[in-house]
């Protein structure tokens, strides 16, 4: 009986030692791999920003991506006023360190969106957003804005790039979503994304966003073609979600105050 107890004790001791050793190995690996993970995440975000801006070369190396992205100015914007915000006001040393999605979950750094106004289905909106501008010879040529909103099954996260007029769309893309492959997942299809190039967000008075996704496609003789894109075939709810999230972020609750000041040279 004593031998049996001794055997059980040894077995438990071995199991405990192995568990501790395994935990140490896993923890050490996680710590060692963390910098590489952060670097890959940053590179992925930069790649998606450049893709939306039409500046990502096929097969570009990490060094080329970093070099091209370095041409952009990263800034923080107060969404209500449209003014630039000092990074220190949101507790970071540099704009790239700011996480607007984390801020959206903090009541002190975000606002609750009334259901009647929440076209994008995001529930809360950060007070400050991170944007990316590119100027050449002192002239603004691109502004890339983060957008997100609910589709059919998931929240879609992406970027929209506007030309220097802060109205004409240069590109749009989503880097994270869980929409149905072959249906709503066609938001990733390059042919569909190419339809956004050259579309105009606002009408002649540059006030309300006018983007529409048209079921059955935009006909050759359709009116207001400059604001319309073909809806995704068989994905009505995803298409509606994309339309609403783009219009939300281009509206008064999103980037409209900033874009207005940008067009008028006030920021």
Image (spheres, rainbow, N blue to C red):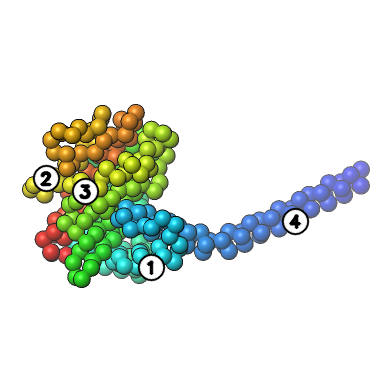
Give x and y (percent) for residue 248: 23, 44
* First of labels 4, 1 by sequence position: 4
Pick the quarter of the image with the C terminus: bottom left
Q: Look at the numbered discs 2 and 3 and tell me whether their residues touch, using CB distance below 8 Å.
A: no
Q: SS at mark 3?
A: loop
**Mark 3 and mark 1: Cα distance apart in space:** 26 Å
Question: How busy is the neighbourhood of tag 2: few (under 14 within 10 Å), some, or many (20 plus)?
Answer: some
Q: Name the residue under label 2.
A: 203
Left or right: where does residue 153 sit relative to residue 39?
left
**Mark 4 and mark 2: Cα distance apart in space:** 69 Å
Q: Mark 1 points at which residue?
A: 67
Mark 3 or mark 4, whichever is nearer to me:
3
Q: Quadrant of residue 26?
A: bottom right
**Mark 1 and mark 2: Cα distance apart in space:** 36 Å
Give x and y (percent) for residue 73: 29, 66
Mark 4 or mark 1, whichever is nearer to me:
1
Q: SS at mark 2?
A: loop
Q: Look at the numbered discs 4 and 1 and tell me whether their residues touch, using CB distance below 8 Å.
A: no
* First of labels 1, 2 by sequence position: 1
157 shown above or below 262: above
Which residue is depicted at the point 34% across and 28% down?
A: 234
102 shown above or below 91: above
Q: Quadrant of residue 46?
A: bottom left
Along the viewing direction, whichever of 137 and 126 lies nearer the viewer: 137
Q: SS at mark 4?
A: helix
Q: Name the residue under label 4.
A: 17
Which residue is depicted at the point 25% across and 30% down?
A: 215
Marking on residue 198: 3
Give x and y (percent) for residue 40: 48, 59
Mark 1 or mark 2, whichever is nearer to me:
1
């Amino acid at each position: 009986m004593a031998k049996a107890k001794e055997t059980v004790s040894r077995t438990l001791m071995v199991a405990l030692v192995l568990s501790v050793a395994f935990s140490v190995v896993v923890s050490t690996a996680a710590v060692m791999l963390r910098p590489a993970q952060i670097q890959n995440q940053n590179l992925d975000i930069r790649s998606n920003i450049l893709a939306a801006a039409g500046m990502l070369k096929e097969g570009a190396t990490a060094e080329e991506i970093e070099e091209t992205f370095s041409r952009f100015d990263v800034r923080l914007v107060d969404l209500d006023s449209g003014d630039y915000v000092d990074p220190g006001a949101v507790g970071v040393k540099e704009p790239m360190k700011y996480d607007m999605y984390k801020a959206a979950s903090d009541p002190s750094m975000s606002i609750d969106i009334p259901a009647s106004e929440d076209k994008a289905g995001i529930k809360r909106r950060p007070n400050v957003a991170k944007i990316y501008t590119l100027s050449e010879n002192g002239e603004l040529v691109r502004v890339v804005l983060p957008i997100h909103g609910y589709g059919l099954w998931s929240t879609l996260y992406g970027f929209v790039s506007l030309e220097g007029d802060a109205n004409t769309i240069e590109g749009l893309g989503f880097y994270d979503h869980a929409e149905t492959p072959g249906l709503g997942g066609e938001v990733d299809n390059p042919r569909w994304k190419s339809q956004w190039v050259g579309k105009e967000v606002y009408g002649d008075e540059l006030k309300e966003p006018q983007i529409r996704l048209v079921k059955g496609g935009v006909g050759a003789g359709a009116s207001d073609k400059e604001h319309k894109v073909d809806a995704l075939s068989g994905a009505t709810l995803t298409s509606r979600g994309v339309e609403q999230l783009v219009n939300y972020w281009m509206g008064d609750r999103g980037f409209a105050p900033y874009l207005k000041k940008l067009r008028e040279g006030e920021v």
